Image (cartoon, grey):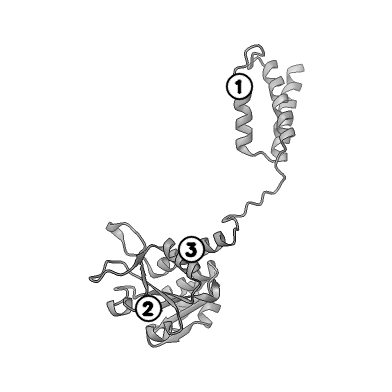
Amino acid sequence: MQNKVRIVLVNTSHPGNIGGAARAMKNMGLADLYLVAPKHFPSDEAISRASGASDLLDNAVVVDTLEEAIADCQLVIGTSARERHIPWPLVDPRQAADLVFDEGLETAFVFGREDRGLTNEELQRCHYHVHIPSVDTFSSLNLAAAVQVIVYELRMKSLLMKDEPVVASKWDLPAATAEQIDFLLEHLETVLVKTEFLEPKTPGKVMTRFRRLFQRSQLDQQELGMLRGMLTAMEKQMKE
């Protein structure tokens, strides 16, 4: 996906937003940044806001017009914060990510100026408009934040297509086995009977609920050992 998707920023006023957009892109695995007639670039402020993504700024393609930025693209998606007089195919960020992967085309996501977005003429060069559904009472997003939303959805779709977990779970210790849970429950039941918390003739569903609790907790082997040790200590105190 990285080589097929570019982020295009049109006439950006604040260099910090360029740096923030570069950082968002690198966070999500994108590298191709195109800048259309930026007001201030290169810029130390852009480098500072990039926070480690300055390589994207070094390799950014700076052009004079949107036409140059999208000339070799097969799919162009422009960000739009409002409805236009002439209806245009409109998608949300997740649908836009679906389009990118379904079509497999060289794609540009185009972001407009901080104060007024893209012009009607620029939007008409886009196959689709993407709208981020923010609340009506405070709908304006910072440019870098808008880029982050789009590239996040692209990253999520990429992971889904690769059948990779969104968040890889790596625990520091092995999980307790079913047999170990059985031994823990037997030990617990013995202690509960000795403390007269549990009536052996009418246990009800107490032990069933404890089993559900432990299985829901997904104990690791050290945690299970701690519980067994606690029960052993309780038994020792009862003997003294």
Could you tell me residue 110's position as x and y percent? 40, 75
From the image, which quarter does the C terminus lie in? top right
Tag 2–tag 3 contact (CB < 8 Å): no
Mark carried by residue 152: 3
Marks 2 and 3: which is nearer the front?
3
Residue 76, by quadrant, is bottom left
Helix, strand or loop status at disc 2: loop
Mark carried by residue 160: none
Identity, as a three-letter code, of the amino acid under mark 2: Thr
Q: Is 178 in front, or is 236?
A: 178
The residue under label 1 is 206
Residue drawn at x 59%, y 58% is 163
Question: Could you tell me how many numbered marks the image carries?
Answer: 3
Helix, strand or loop status at disc 1: helix
Q: Is 43 in front, or is 194?
A: 194
Mark carried by residue 12: 2
Identity, as a three-letter code, of the amino acid under mark 1: Val
Up-down: is 112 above or below 165? below
Question: In the figure, is residue 80 to the left or right of 105?
Answer: left
Residue 114, by quadrant, is bottom left
From the image, which quarter does the N terminus lie in? bottom right
Going from N to C along the chain, the mark reached first, 3 or 1, is 3
Going from N to C along the chain, the mark reached first, 1 or 2, is 2
Q: Is 62 in front, or is 236?
A: 62
For the residues labelled 1 and 2, the Cα–Cα distance comes to 64 Å
> Quick one: label 3, few (<14), some, or many (20+) residues within 10 Å?
many
